[in-house]
Amino acid sequence: MASHPGNPTAFDGPAGKPQAIAWSFADGRQASGLTLPGMNRAQPRKVLIVGGGVGALEAAIALGDLAGGKARVEICAGRGEFVYRPFAVGEPYGASRVLRYDLADLAERCGAELRLDNIASVDPALRCATTHDGEEIPYDYLVVSPGTRLLWSVPGAVTFWGVADEGEMLEIVGRLREGRLRRLIFTMPGGHGWALPAYELALLAAGELSRHGIAGTEITVVTPEDGPLLIFGRRASEQVADLLADHDVNVLTGTHPVKYENGALSVVPGEPIEADAVVSLPRLEGRHIEGLPYDSSGFIPVDDHARIEGLSNAFAVGDVTNFPIKQGGIATQQADVAAEAIAADLGCDAEANPLDPVLRGVLWTGAKPRYLFGWLGGGHGETSVASERPPWPIDNPSKLIGRYLTPFLADLQASSRAEPSSAAG
């Protein structure tokens, strides 16, 4: 990047957007939104959000609310579609469907611009991101939320990817309904992740057996956890264990799956477990962007304000971070604290609060859902619970709870129902 800009010239942004500044570099390139010596500080600062998922959208909406005209938000994503994944567990059973939204429409609704491209590298010193095609994008603040890569975790097992192309899962559900599976195992790898979908798949499978009057099929969850969904807390885990027992779902804890072959799942520790089919959640790996720091597991280290370790104006939120729980609700909380930190730095009326993560989950059971809740930090006393009613204020039945994104999507769905021609959904 050229080190000495030429003269700034004003230009009108999109309708309804604040005026921005275009800087011409010596080689003719322009950089809009980058803070440079001599620039008018009254101009909005460029916030570049990398990714088009839950954390990215929450950050964009939060910045619009907290920073207003002091921030100009651009979302850079490789796909023009936002996929709402929490409903994916019900799709193979015909109980729900994955929702898909046009990302350009969502960006416009939350006051952001959209660039369809992937970021290959970042130069934090120059505050410049570079796309795979070599285009440079200057920024004042960076919010990285590209998600993770989903990888096979148990050789020989069917992997539940959490998206709509679940052909192998549909085949397993079909065999289950026909009574051709006598031993079905659901499992997951250890390490960073989110275990709840495995329990939902098992409970929904048990519900299928009950509805079709099929007896003699054994359903088991094999988990590295010391207790089912223990991340929510001891009391919630015990209540989930009771729920699983009531639905005749066996749980083998403290056990890591290795591979499935010749009708048996190899595990550590223990002897192989006979099974007619095994379904595993995928292993997660952070998406790599050159120029950013990563830990030994491939995730970006962040502090309690979602700031990337060692970088002052760069943040990361969601599954790409080293926060051990990969859940949409946690991603929205990280996005909120990042937006607060940026807004406070811009002089807005916002307080930069540290992350105090609370875990909320909706466990589909095939009958009444269970609402799981627990504070992950100390100082809150005993909060862990799994109940038939949500222990938090709720205005809609969303499985993903985010301060901004949940009501945003709810309003969008309401608008879609009121206007059948809407492109949403």
Image (cartoon, rainbow, N blue to C red):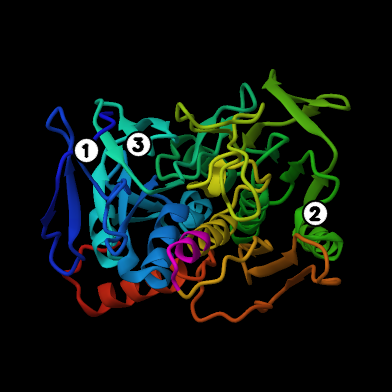
Q: What is the secondary structure assignment of the residue under circle 1?
A: loop
> Of callouts 2 and 3, which one flags the residue occurring earlier in the amino acid sequence?
3
Residue bearing mark 1: 5
Comes first in the chain, label 1 or label 2? 1
Q: Is residue 271 above or below residue 198?
A: above
> Could you tell me residue 397's position as x and y percent?
51, 74
Is label 2 or label 3 in front?
A: 3
Q: Residue at x 71, y 45 (%)?
A: 217
Task: Kindly identify which residue carries mark 3.
Answer: 128
Task: Measure the alpha-carbon separation of dots 1 and 2.
Answer: 55 Å
Residue type (three-letter) at the residue carrying disc 3:
Cys
Q: Nearer the viewer, mark 1 or mark 2?
A: 1
Are dots 2 and 3 in contact, CB under 8 Å?
no
Span highlighted in magenta in the image: 341-348
Magenta segment main secondary structure: helix
Q: Residue 342 magenta-drawn? A: yes
Q: Amino acid at mark 2?
A: Leu
**Residue identified by numbered label 2:** 230
The quadrant of the picture occupied by the N terminus is: top left
Q: Residue at x 48, y 47 (%)?
A: 313
Residue 264 position, x and y percent, is: 74, 24
Label 3: element kind: strand
In the image, is residue 155 part of the stretch drawn in magenta? no
Residue 263 can be seen in this image: no
The residue closer to the viewer here, 425 or 141, is: 141
Indicate left or right for 316 with 63 as reference.
right
Residue placed at 80% from the left, 68% from the top?
Answer: 384
User: Can see residue 64?
Assistant: yes
Q: Residues within 10 Å of mark 1 (few under 14, many from 20)?
A: some
